[in-house]
Image (cartoon, grey):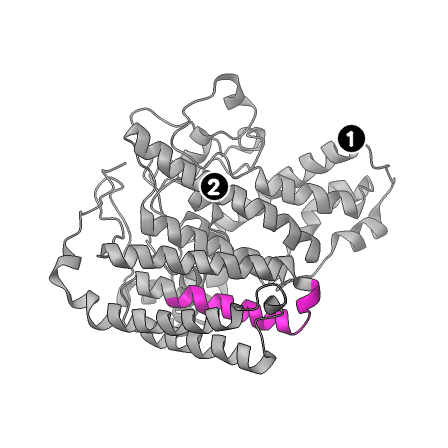
Amino acid sequence: MEAYGKILLIAMPAFLLLVLFEKWYGWYKGNDTVRGMDMISSLSSGITNVTKDVLGLSITILTYDWLVNKIAIYHIQSTVWTYIIAFIVIDFAGYWVHRIDHKINIFWNSHLVHHSSEEFNLACALRQSISVFIRLFTFLLIPAALFGVPTEVIAIVAPIQLFAQFWYHTRHIKKMGILEKIIVTPSHHRVHHALNPEYIDKNLSQIFIIWDKIFGTFQEELPDKPPVYGITRPVSTWNPIAINFQHLWLLIKDAWRTKSWKDKLRIWFMPTGWRPNDVAEKYSVYKIEDAYNFEKYNPASSTLLYAWSWVQLSVLLLLISWLFGNLASIGSPAMFIYGAFIFIDVYAFTELMNRNKYALAWELIKCIAGIGIIYYYGNWFGADAILSWINIALIVYFIIALIATIWFVLVDFNKDDTAVVKTVTAQNV
């Protein structure tokens, strides 16, 4: 956990700078592909995901270490070839995990958040799941285990393979010649993120596009079919925590409401989107039927709300950096309390972005929790050892944040001018 936290201290600023550079580049070229609130939502989603991962809030039923110790028929040494083999095996496993996520109802819940943005840019790459608490697919690494690829090699290569999937989430890079036949390119991945009928569930590879071509899931980006991004059942929220559990909640409700016991059991493992007939008839769910004719989620927001959302996100990034850089000294259970606060913070300010008046209740909880932590521990998890004024500064911030939320809910949300917003449609692609 601590080592991963240190890696993220370097990776997070790099990713943020690239996201902001893409925003600037799009503006400079007159082709801005990054909507402000959508970007903040994506960045906050990334924060919740890495917080969960760093704190180890999931269990693996079958660990790779156990697997390699039990079934290895040969133990290879850690050479360059070992890392290459590990990379290929992880990419192969990634393809099949990705394919399962797209094809089976219960597993779609863990992947939906990544497709939830109605834009396609570097920021949306950071939309990753927090809803996976049990990891099931280690058995897909059996080829590596049979060759005895060391556990420490897998541990190094897996994050590299994950980070290598970041760069191709962009509309600014067109087709890349010969590389289109070898690796996943932005063109391939634009297809993957599209909700056009001809593009859904295509290009599931992560690094090497060859897996799609071998297993029949490849689709080229068509010049007469521009990709439209998002999912056919739009999430209609900026709150990444809510997005993570939307599909699961629908499955739970459908399983409860259907009169068929068979459907109550099989709904979880049916193809993605399947619903029992009796429930679908009585409880309809909005679905986009025309990829080129629907309104993207774009609730009214004033300039002040947009600016304040950036302030909230900036403070959150500073707080998360302190957590990742000081996991060992913060220790347990304090680091889990810290993590819970991060989640409350994200929930509160993204609900405010949604113009949800209940954001006030969440902000109050955040304010009480933040001040309560300082009162209980006497400091903000040891940060006063470096910044003697940090406790006072945070208390003032929590109070200001609460007052600001009260003002937005009671005053700003009721102003007529906040409702004047340019409609963003799927045709603005």
Return the residue nearer the eye: 390 or 234.
390
Which residue is label 2 attached to? 17
Is residue 99 visible from the viewing direction of this image?
A: no
Circle 2 Cα neighbour tier, 10 Å, few/some/many (<14 / 14–19 / ≥20): few
Horizontal arrangement in the rendering, residue 318 relative to residue 256 (left or right): right
Q: In the picture, residue 224 is in which quadrant?
A: top left
Secondary structure under tag 1 reads: helix
Q: In the picture, residue 83 is in which quadrant?
A: top right
Which residue is label 1 attached to? 80
Q: Amino acid at mark 2?
A: Leu
Q: In the picture, residue 89 is in which quadrant?
A: top right
- Contact (Cβ within 8 Å) of mark 2 with mark 1: no
Image point (28%, 73%), residue name: 406
Q: Amino acid at mark 1?
A: Val
Residue 411, percent from left and from top: 19, 70
Quadrant location of the N terminus in the rendered image: bottom right
Residue 75, percent from left and from top: 87, 40
Image point (64%, 48%), residue name: 7
Is 355 one of the magenta-colored residues? no
Is 334 one of the magenta-colored residues? yes
The part of the chain drawn in magenta is: 328-348
Return the residue nearer the eye: 144 or 122.
122
Earlier sequence position, callout 2 versus callout 1: 2
Image point (83%, 48%), residue name: 71
Number of labels in the image equals 2
Q: From the viewer's perspective, is residue 282 above or below residue 217? A: below
